Amino acid sequence: MRLTAFSNYALRTLQFAALRAPARTRIDEIADAHGINRAHIVKIVHLLGREGYLETRRGRGGGFTLARPPEAISVGEILRLTEGPFELVECHHAPTNTCPLIGVCRLSKALAKALDAFLASLDAVTIADIAANRGALLARLSPESDADQAPEPSGRGAVVHHSGL
Amino acid sequence: MRLTAFSNYALRTLQFAALRAPARTRIDEIADAHGINRAHIVKIVHLLGREGYLETRRGRGGGFTLARPPEAISVGEILRLTEGPFELVECHHAPTNTCPLIGVCRLSKALAKALDAFLASLDAVTIADIAANRGALLARLSPESDADQAPEPSGRGAVVHHSGL
């Protein structure tokens, strides 16, 4: 049982944006920090922007910030958005279901209830919670920059700025 | 987020064996009922036998039965056995971890806690529970046989017996 990489990096993107606030975050920073292709992050930022979780600005000096306070975004709601329909087993997705037990299966109902417990646990966790230990996280994600950086770093050790997001 | 097919059919195998008790179940019956390759069920029966959940008998008249009362086998314990290490995200599997946040990431801890809630919910569900509505389930799984069949069906409409499990 595994979350999609899309879900994982959507949460990482929001976590990163919360850590960098009030500064903007660029897609390249997240791709570099996590060692993944920027095309994945482009798709994630597009979805999170469209759904009102990120505010994006194009061009030089661009990037994105959280569009809501991090305390107002739960991990559970993001997973509901990014996992699409949660299908623990095939029969949870009715249109393509081939299970002969649909409608009478108590295992299916038990799994749905367990999934509710899983998501309820994550509804109680916010982006602010997973970004609360800011210093420790930034030291890992941007080891070349100061974890207590000012919004506009400059001079030696400053983050290299690319044009675009 | 999805359970492996192996987990799903391991639970279906135990459910089927509980429904057929005290009669033995054959691998072909489960493969036919669920429309899947018998090789999958062979592997599942091997594991469940080795781990003490099934008693198997080879040859003509062979098959398998539950090795424990269905009330004494929880869905949660079977998933822990069949999913291998639960890796909701890559970083939950330390040997291959590449996440820069390992050790300081509160998202990882929140996901582990949610997984505990998921499994705790399924620890409270037994194979007896998911086989309790015996008549409705057997009508779907073996529509040609009588849901209230005697342990040794015979004559017209009886299940065709193959040699082996």
Image (spheres, coloured by chain):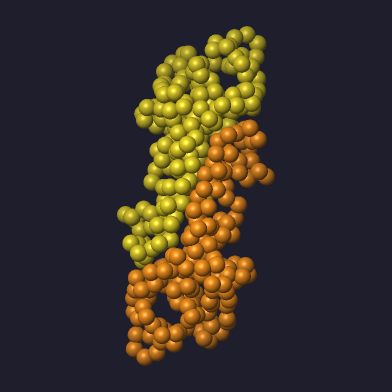
Chain colours: A orange, B yellow
Depth check, front residue: A101 or A106: A106
- As drawn, is A152 to the left or to the right of A74? left
Measured as percent of width and height from the top left, residue B49 is found at 39, 27
Measured as percent of width and height from the top left, residue A28 is found at 46, 75
Residue reaching furthest to the right: A95
Q: Total number of numbered labels?
A: 0
Depth check, front residue: A83 or B40: A83
Residue reaching furthest to the top: B155
Above or below, B119 relative to B162:
below
Q: Residue at x 39, y 72 (%)?
A: A134
Q: Residue at x 51, y 68 (%)?
A: A71
Q: Quadrant of residue A30?
A: bottom left
- As drawn, is A15 to the left or to the right of A146? right
| Visible residue check, residue B135 | yes
Above or below, B153 relative to A6:
above
Q: Quadrant of residue B119?
A: top left
Depth check, front residue: A15 or A97: A15
Above or below, A50 relative to B132:
below
Measured as percent of width and height from the top left, residue A145 is found at 36, 80
Q: Residue at x 48, y 32 (%)?
A: B126
